[in-house]
Image: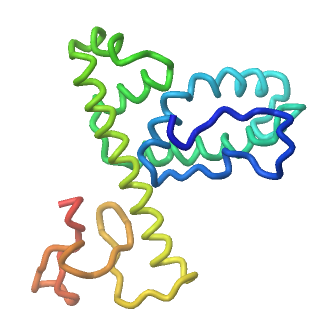
Amino acid sequence: MGAVHQETLGQNRNCHEWEALSLSEINTIKSLIINRIEFDKFYEVKLYETQSVFSTNGVPQFYEIIEVTYLDLERLIKNARLSDQQRMIIKYVMRGYDYGWIGDKIGCTALNIENIFDTACEKIKEQNDFEWQEWIETSGQIKVEGEYKQCSKCQRWLKANEENFSPDKRNKDGFHSFCRQCR
């Protein structure tokens, strides 16, 4: 199950395993998606009882940590460049369906569904890594050398270099206004 573990109450320790989750690990992303159905059961009960997403009402405190982790994961899924098929498979896996059932539903083998799911998880990890790198470079928290340019299409700030932008002598900075991913 990767870095995701079921929390056991009464272990007399100062931190929860949930606090050690990293969305830069593919196995963590996979485990969070696969186990989403289990978390949602408790989340729905808590939301019904309290009418508040972040009110604990006797629910163990680590649930707030995992709620925020799932919010981050949902944002990454939304921002990652996934195909409609990959998004659909993720949705089914989050609802607790296995690869065989999903394959029967859309006319693929279970192995093919697993491969598509694995590729989607890799794209989600890449999106997470990209967003962290972008934050490091643009937050001012860490001094990074070089100049940056905002893509006119996706609005992301990227280093102004040939890795991120195609050369274009017509522009003052020498690069195309759209990043390579958007072109």
- Residue drawn at point x = 41 percent, y = 46 percent: 26
Q: Is residue 96 above or below residue 43?
A: above
Residue farthest toward the right in the current orientation of the protein: 58
Determine whether, in the image, residue 140 is placed left or right of residue 11: left
- Residue drawn at point x = 24 percent, y = 67 percent: 179
Quadrant placement of the C terminus: bottom left
Q: Is residue 37 above or below residue 174?
A: above
On the image, the x and y values in percent for residue 19 come to 68, 51
Name which quarter of the figure residue 167 lies in.
Answer: bottom left
In this view, the residue in front, 35 or 107, is 35
Determine whether, in the image, residue 169 is placed left or right of residue 58: left
In this view, the residue in front, 137 or 117, is 117
What scheme was used to colour the molecule? rainbow
Name which quarter of the figure residue 46 lies in.
Answer: top right
Q: Is residue 161 above or below residue 179?
A: below
On the image, the x and y values in percent for residue 81 come to 31, 47
- Residue drawn at point x = 49 percent, y = 33 percent: 33
Q: Is residue 162 above or below residue 16?
A: below
On the image, the x and y values in percent for residue 72 come to 56, 48
Name which quarter of the figure residue 154 lies in.
Answer: bottom left
